[in-house]
Structures are given as structure tokens and as C-alpha cells.
Amino acid sequence: MKWILIVICISFFLIKPFGQSSFFQNSDTLNKNRLRGAIIAESVLGVSSILVLNEVWYKNYPRSTFHFFDDSDEWLQIDKFGHATTSYYMGLTGIEVMKWSGFKGAKRSFIGGSLGFIYLAGVELLDGFSDQWGFSNSDVLANAAGTALVIAQDLAWQEQRFRLKISTHLSPFAKYRPNLLGSSLSERLLKDYNGQTIWLSANISSFLPEDSKFPKCLSVSVGIGGEEMISGKPRTNVIFNGEDISKDFNRYRQYYLSLDLDLSYIKTKNKFIKGFTSVFGLIKFPFPTIEFSKQGVKFYPVYF
């Protein structure tokens, strides 16, 4: 369910206009009309998406009184990194909206960058009243980490030199629990944590002198993933073809080293390219990758 939030995040991110008229350019001074419109739009979109989530997801599960739920040991924390990524990109969108409205300095960073944390707090409240889940302190901590990353960089550099990214591929484990890990292609890509990798990409040129000839959009990335996770909890009996197969799987973490492209450094007036960079800003580009895990070291010519 948590990766549905990534889809919502993308929807928010796509609000950024691709046009070239003066209306779509950032304001040099505080524009109260723009700020008022942005607040109204974000409020409507935020509240309506929470209501939609409640109708299409939470309504299908039993309700309960508000309660807490400790899921900090689930999925080797890959879902927590997903929360941080969602919060990060929603905060980045908030900062861009503040720039468009003419906000500057710390107010822009804190007000805009907190958009993801505030929105996801509403989702956590829905979890808190759901019998199957609960309000998760570890989710809130992950949301705060993503928010802190985007705010700190905007305060320090007025740009994002480190970006959280995602990549996903099909794993062989979904067949054992299709209801949990997905049965269709889209479900498996969204729900199977075995195939998901969270990356932190650092743009190298942003730390070099401005006259450096190093490629502006080239980044180095470190990633984290997990394998052999057929349940959320580490000790859960899983029945497949009448047998308990949980003892056959021993979950473990994977760490990755790779390259990436930061498309925000591509300067262009082409609307198609601008749209492309906005849509795919959170996706890690396939590159040669080295994996480190308890299974040893592996090299992938191209890793998704």
C-alpha cells in the first residue's frame, strides 16, 4: 500500500508547469495572488487525495479505535526508505511552488519543504484508525528524514545536490505470495519490495568549481535493497502448495554502487524535455552497478 503514495507523489510533482509564458516563471518578489492560489490548490488536492485513499483503500478494511503499530522490523526497512523518498519529492514540489510564489530564504525552505511531512501525517492518521495497520512512529521518522533532506539542502545550497531515487524490477518471489507481493505486472512493480531499490544520488559537478568540465548531469549513487522477503515480518509462516516454505528463505540486505543522471541540470527550453525531466526525476537511470551482500559481490552491466 505504501508505494501508492509514490504514485500520489508523482501526481503532485507533475503540477509543475512546462510552459514558457511569464505566468509560469518564478516571481522575483512575493506574489500574494500566486501564494493564495497555491495554498488553495494544495489544500484541495491534499484533502481530496486523502478522501480518495479512504474510499478506495481504507474503506475496504475493518476500522478500529486509534492505536499505534510497530512495523519497524518489516521488509528490512525498505518501505521506510520509500516513505522518505515520497516525503522528499513532495517537499521538493512544495519548495518549487514557494519559488513560483516569490518566497525566498528560510521561509521558502521550511514552508515548502514540509509539504510531504504534513500530507503523510494525514495518511498515518488513517492508518491509526485501521484495524489492519496502525499509527507507525517509524513511518513518521522516515517521513521526517525525507523532509529534513530536502529542507537542509535548500537552506545550504538553494539546490538539491543529493537526490533520493527509486528503481524497480521483477523478482522471482512474487509467485509465492501473489496476494501480498502482486500478481500483475503493475502490482509486482509496486508491491514487491524484493525488486525495489532506493538510491541516494550525489551530483558530482555541484561540488566542483563552476568552470569545471566535468559533466553537469552525472551523479554517483549508492542504493539499498532486500532479497528473499516473502513476508513483512522476519518470522512468519508462509504456506505454499501445502508446505511451510518460510524456512527456505533467509532475508538479507543488498547494497549497491552505481552512476546516475541528474536531469535537473539539463538546460533546455524544449517543452518535451522539460516534461520528461519532471516525470522521470525520481527514477534512477539504469547503469552498470556493483552489488554487495552476504552472497558476495556481483556486477550488473545494466541494473534496473
Image (cartoon, helix red, strand yellow):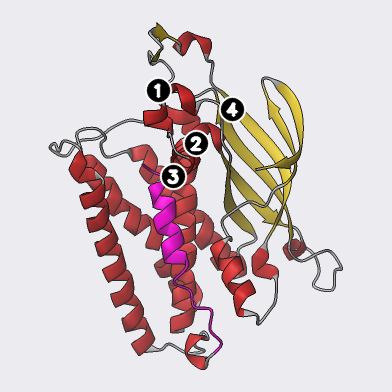
Eye-nearest disc, 3 or 2: 2
Amino acid marked by disc 3: Ala
**Residue where numbered disc 1 is placed:** 233
Disc 1 marks a residue whose amino acid type is Lys
Distance from disc 4 to disc 2, alpha carbons, whole Å, reads: 9 Å
What separation in Å lies between label 1 and label 4 (alpha carbons)?
Answer: 14 Å
Identify the secondary structure beneath mark 1: loop
Going from the N terminus, do you reach mark 4 or mark 2 first? 2
Pointer 1 or 4: first along the chain: 1
Residue closest to the far right: 213
Q: Which of the two residues, 240 or 221, is positioned nearer the viewer here?
A: 240
What residue is disc 2 on?
A: 78
Residue for point 39% across, 57% down: 8
**Quadrant the C terminus occupies:** top right
Please tell me the numbered disc located at residue 142.
3
Segment tinted magenta in the rendering = 1-20
Residue at mark 3 to residue at mark 2: CA–CA distance: 11 Å
Q: Mark 3 against mark 4, which lies toward the viewer?
A: 4
- What numbered label is drawn on residue 250? none
Pointers 1 and 2 in contact (CB under 8 A)?
no
Residue type pointed to by label 2: Ile
Q: In percent of the image, x 75 and y 62: which residue is there?
A: 207
